Image (cartoon, rainbow, N blue to C red):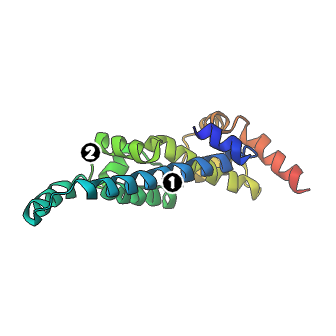
Amino acid sequence: MLARIETNIGSGSSDEASVKIRLSILELITAINEMYKFFTREKHTAADPEERKRKGDEEKFRDPILYRERVEQIKKYIATHVEEKLDLDEIAGKFYMNRYYLSHYFKKETGFTVLQYVTNQKIIAAKALLKKGTSVTDVALKLSYNSDSHFISVFKKSTGITPKKYAQNKKNNNV
């Protein structure tokens, strides 16, 4: 479905745009799903005010909006700490969540695992740094990769080209 939407949009010029489009589409689908649940829940609520209150209290803890808000907080945390070494246990600890619970609901809300999302954010940051002329070694250090070779491997796996070729392509396009 996402591939069909991207084809209709005509994107594909850059991987960064593709990731942003996918995230936007996923957020749109999630919002539509929440609205659908809201309106269908209204039809099925009981007429008795006491029963409505009891059911409302029960559903308060299962409300998808709460999960969505928490996932948005986690996404903001990842974006602001993209230069740090981020792992699932650390993020789960910061938000007082079980790592399995976090993984499940993050994937349910975004369509990405936490680590895939962290990697995507790091790649977006790496592309911005490479466009500015930062060396591959400096980018790897700044984004807390274990080594240059690990950064190059992750970058190539995500984009299809090495960081050096990406920087050269951007430099040639700007000339």
Q: Quadrant of the N terminus?
A: top right
Query: What is the CA distance from the residue labelled 2 to the residue labelled 1?
Result: 27 Å
Front tag of 2 and 1: 1
Q: Quadrant of the C terminus?
A: bottom right
Q: Total label count? A: 2
The mark found on residue 28 in the picture is 1
* Residue under the point 68% across and 39% down: 159
Q: Amino acid at mark 2?
A: Asn
Residue projecting furthest to the right: 175
**Residue 125 image point, x, y percent:** 62, 54
* Residue under the point 44% across and 56% down: 31
Residue that numbered label 2 is attached to: 98
In the displayed structure, does residue 63 sit left or right of residue 16? left
In the displayed structure, does residue 172 sit left or right of residue 85? right
Frontmost residue, 155 versus 5: 5
**Residue 10 image point, x, y percent:** 74, 46
Q: Is residue 166 above or below residue 94?
A: above
Q: Is residue 40 above or below residue 87?
A: below
**Residue 75 image point, x, y percent:** 45, 56
